[in-house]
Image: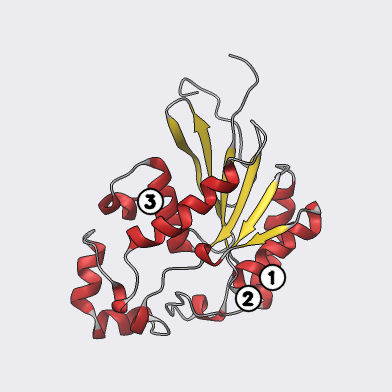
Amino acid sequence: MNGHRGRRIILWRHGQTLWNLERRFQGSTDIPLTEAGLGQARRAARLLASLKPDAIIASDLGRAAATAAELAAVTGLHITHDEALRETYAGVWQGLTHEEIITLHGEEYTAWKRGEPVRRGGGELESEVADRAAPVVLRHTEKLPEDGTLVVVSHGGTIRTTIGRLLGLDARHWESLGGLSNCCWSVLGQGARGWRLLEHNAGTLPEPVLGDDV
């Protein structure tokens, strides 16, 4: 086995917002980071910078753009913003709290949790989010050196659907990927048979896997 590692994709969720604290569905609403969220982004950026990323792409919504800016500041890398990396548009759900969604749209919420294709609030299907986000991620990955690393700064729902699509999981199983905490990340690595999930919802420096499954 040689030292060739293959390309890596780090999918990094934005820092905390006020709506996160209020458990309010953000979707494509442009909500800024809190001071705590900015602090999370600064801390995480120092860790991610040590992984020596080659490129940064980010959602153009303020909370993701501000998170990405912290990594750009410590790496000197340019950020490519793309609206295809925005959070799922969720129509009338946007701005509602978790409790309000369950009260007002309980059947729709339950169907979504069961893995059925649901236009939450009359918005996008999860498969449509993957249709717009995953190709952008792959296009930028193809520009990397053979062992390069791309950082994608995006949103919880968009990251989950993108990971599901890149791993080749059926859309009804994407929910089995747990959510990402604010400013945590997941790492995909290019293997002989496609992409592999190496880290999920990590908030510390990824460690090499030492064992049989290499």
Mark found first going from the N terminus, 2 or 3: 2
Determine the CA span between mark 2 and mark 1.
Answer: 6 Å
Q: Which residue is labeled 1 in the image?
A: 38
Q: Are marks 2 and 1 in contact (CB under 8 Å)?
A: yes
Residue type at tag 1: Leu
Determine which quarter of the picture holds residue 42: bottom right
Name the one closer to the observer, 15 or 128.
128
* Residue 6 appears left or right of 108: right
Label 3: state its secondary structure.
loop
User: Alpha-carbon neighbours of circle 3 within 10 Å: few (<14), some, or many (≥20)?
Assistant: few
* Residue 210 appears left or right of 127: right
Q: Could you tell me which residue is drawn at 70 percent across and 42 percent down?
A: 51
Instruction: Residue 47: give x, y in percent of width and height.
Output: 71, 50
Determine the CA span between mark 3 and mark 1.
Answer: 26 Å
- Residue 33 badge: 2
Determine the CA span between mark 2 and mark 3.
Answer: 25 Å
Mark found first going from the N terminus, 2 or 1: 2
- Whether residue 179 can be seen here: no
Residue type at tag 3: Leu
Is the residue 146 above or below the residue 29 in the image?
above
Q: Which residue is labeled 3 in the image?
A: 177
Mark found first going from the N terminus, 3 or 1: 1
